[in-house]
Image (cartoon, helix red, strand yellow):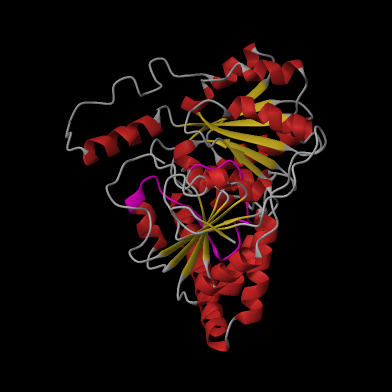
Amino acid sequence: MCVPRPFPVMEPPPAAAAGGGGAPPRPPAPDPDGVRVVVRQFLDAAKPAIVIGDDVARAGAGDAAVRLAEATGAGIWTELLHQHQPVPNAHPNYRGRLPSDAASIAESLGDADLVLLAGGPFFEEVWYAPTGPFPPGATVVQIEEAAERLGRNYGPATGLIAGLGPALEAVCAQVLSDRPAAFAAAADRRNESFAALREKERKSRRALLEIGRERRPMPVALALETLAAAAPEETAVVEEAITAGREIPRAFDFRGPGDFFTGRGGGIGQGVAGALGVKLACPDRPVLCISGDGSAMYSIQALWTAAHHGLPILFVILANREYRILKHNLDIYRHRFGAASNRPYREMDLIDPPLGFVEMAAGMGVAGTRVTEPEELESAARGAFSSGAPHLIEVAVEGKT
């Protein structure tokens, strides 16, 4: 039924109140009328797009989101601030994470005429923009497990309250049942274009890696590619590299939740400490923590805890000797607000004296290796993973990522 609100919300009647104790309440099943409305909006769209949040990962609904994308020829994006990888990052329809301001989000979504939002606050932009995050004229649909999520920052045309997995599965099944041949053919063409674009991106990346192979300090992309080659199967990656964050899913193959962890709050400092929690939660999986040198300094004492409890984690510090994210944000601020300046970046360089992460690790009982060459990095990483003990590798990388 439609609940009278500022936007139509499709949800079934509430179930009878449960008694005290027992399992936590489950989200409602998808309302058939609501599903039909969403399906009709998809079938009326020429270029749909899907944006998913961390709740999709928590609900185990990533596969359903992928099947819906394939059925409709939609690209899939994740929010800028996200904690998990909800869908395989190698899937052709996965287009990556969205930018940090509304105008750039709308630009990324291009000429999409329908945007489905599922499982997130949508959007938590870092920088203000006077425009909205959706392409002009696009229909916005949102599926959430709780009414409080709907329209938190931007009101959709239609909202559906239901368990994310069942709702996405229901929409996908009915789309496949109802779509006319012309819609199916157009969806297939869009899927093929995503696959061609992904292949073009792979070739471009390989060419850039070859160009940068001889540069020293080595490019971040080369360091990450080397780490990905050295990491064992089933490695869980914990990331707080920030300015290198977009390169990590290009180097690693994340199949879904559990393969990748990062912080969604926008603060700095959880990476090195967070890797301990991931290892405790996943004791049978190798754990690789990738951190920038600036980020690592917020919780470097977590190395002592790793040594104290004998947690075999590989900590890799990408040392560019600067707080690059702070410089990047200052550049954006100056550009956006016309605050032109030729002044240097005060207190944003990690030099004079340089930070010695290998020495810091040694002081907390963790063995460390400092490397400058890809071959050294690969050898050190393989040795660290097989050592059964915590290990830190400090990698000298280019200053701008």
Q: Residue at 65%, 49% (x, y): give it.
A: 57
Q: Quadrant of residue 367?
A: top right
Secondary structure predominantly adopted by residues drawn in magenta: loop
Q: Determine if residue 85 is in view.
A: no
In the rendering, at what x and y percent does residue 302 appear? 64, 19
Q: Is residue 85 magenta?
A: yes
Residue furthest out toward the bottom = 181
Q: Residue at 48%, 19% (x, y): give it.
A: 355
Q: Residue at 29%, 21% (x, y): give it.
A: 346
In the rendering, at what x and y percent does residue 340 appear? 16, 35
Name the foreground residue: 326 vs 32.
32
Report the side of 75 relative to 166 (left or right): left
Q: Quadrant of the C terminus?
A: top left
Q: Determine if residue 325 is in view.
A: yes
In the rendering, at what x and y percent does residue 105 appear? 39, 53
Q: Which residues are magenta?
A: 81-103
Name the foreground residue: 60 vs 97.
60
